[in-house]
Image: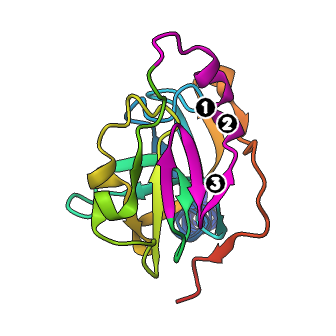
Amino acid sequence: MSKRDLIYGSVILFIVILIWSILRFFVFTPLKVNDTFMQPFLMKDERILTFRLTKVKRFDVVAFSDLNNSKQKYVKRVVGLPYDEVRFMDDVLYINGEVVDEPYLKDYKQKLVDGEPFTPDFNLEQLFGVSEVPKDKFFVLGDNRREDRNIKNQGLIEKKQIIGEVKFAFWPFKFFGPITNSVEDSSAKTDLAES
């Protein structure tokens, strides 16, 4: 191999690594699901890609980091957007006083046989001492509500904690492919770039 070929190969390798690094830092982030909060939508230990250049809509599934430990990552569903009043009563979600359907929970609720609610009654005032989701924050919950017991510590997150929207699964291979959200609410969009 000539010196010219070696330099050429090194330049190509550098360009590939640079492009990968830019995409990895600015466009997507690979993550591992570390808990059962989103089962069966996302399984524990599943490997996923989150995309950064996105608008957050109600019911999107997002990955976010813990405020106190940036290495700790969580994946949950956005239920409340900034300025939303959120409460659950009799296993029904109310946003700004209106009943909002959660079709992604249908299978969970059909399997309940103990007569207990899938989501306990609460409102934001009881949990966080606020009547609505503050500016630049989101209220998130896991789909597996009976497992997601740490709502008070991981339910109200800041915009800066959000890594991105979960869009693709790549491991185990049987889950390989795009992850589509079963709920569309295009009327409720918040741009992460907005203040």
| Marks 1/3: CA–CA distance | 12 Å
Q: Does 183 sit left or right of 162 as displayed?
A: right
Identity, as a three-letter code, of the amino acid under mark 3? Asp
Above or below, 2 relative to 141:
below
On residue 31, the disc is none
Query: Count of labels shown?
Result: 3
Badge 1: residue crowd in 10 Å (few <14, some 14–19, many ≥20)? some
Q: Tell me which segment is drawn in magenta.
A: 86-115
The outermost residue toward the top is 113
Residue 174: x and y in percent read: 67, 20
Q: Earlier in the sequence, mark 2 or mark 1?
A: 1
Badge 3: residue crowd in 10 Å (few <14, some 14–19, many ≥20)? many
Q: Nearer the viewer, mark 2 or mark 1?
A: 2
| Marks 2/3: CA–CA distance | 11 Å
- The structure residue drawn at horizontal position 44% and vertical position 28%, both measured from the top left corner, is 45
Above or below, 11 relative to 175:
below
On residue 41, the disc is 1
Q: Which residue is mark 3?
A: 60
The outermost residue toward the bottom is 195
- The structure residue drawn at horizontal position 57% and vertical position 77%, both measured from the top left corner, is 192
User: Can residue 95 be found in the magenta stretch?
Assistant: yes
On residue 104, the disc is 2
Q: Secondary structure at mark 3?
A: loop
